[in-house]
Amino acid sequence: MGDYRDAAIDARGAAMDRLIRTYFDGCNEADVEKIASCFTPDAVHFFPPGMYEGPFRGSRKIAEKWRDAVNNLGSYWTVDRLLVEPLRHEAVMEWTHFKTRQNTILRGIEWYEFDQASGLIREIRAYYASPQAQGEDRLELGGFDYKSRGYPMAPPPGAR
């Protein structure tokens, strides 16, 4: 049997992997320029409701907020698991965020979407490992338009 791998797709996947790792290196170095260079200018980083001040909008804002986390919280992140899907220009990653000045460990997963033209990150959706928030009836990302993205808004008819 022949090799069905496509060199261009393999190269795209490797570039996506490198870009995410460069982003995390930039975060750990508190290097605003390095972080911002990984994103489209209008990139958005979504979080669960009540986290920070809502979505970070724009490459500079994302970079400055993570620089501030390093400077104020002693933040350090690790890339624990990373899967890239070069055909769809998407990736998913499991990470650990050490907030050394608070003696806190935060774990989660992020979904990445890449701009097809530039290859840069255009969106991150962060999901945190934590118990379900009591008293909340919608446990989803704050500011993310699920309806316009085609996500289900109700169970199918007849669901129990």
Image (spheres, rainbow, N blue to C red):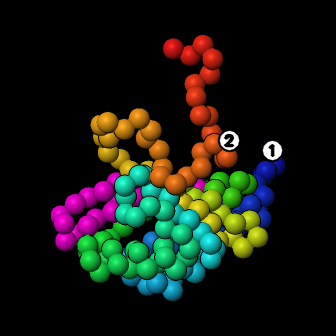
Q: Secondary structure at mark 1?
A: loop
Q: Position of residue 80 (x, y in %)?
A: 41, 58
Principal secondary structure, stretch drawn in magenta: strand
The magenta stretch spans residue 108: yes
Measured along the vertical axis of the image, is residue 72 above or below residue 52? below
Q: CA distance from mark 2 to mark 1?
A: 39 Å
Q: Position of residue 152 (x, y in %)?
A: 61, 34
Instruction: Name which residue type carries label 1.
Output: Met
Q: 52 or 18: which is nearer to us?
A: 52
Q: 7 or 113: which is nearer to us?
A: 113
Q: Is residue 114 left or right of residue 58?
A: right
Instruction: Name which residue type carries label 2.
Output: Gly
Residue lying at 62% horizontally and 39% vertically, measured from the top left? 151
Question: Dot 2 corresponds to which residue?
Answer: 150
| Residue interval drawn in magenta | 91-109
- Quadrant hosting residue 27: bottom left
- Quadrant hosting residue 31: bottom left
Q: Is residue 151 left or right of residue 141?
A: right
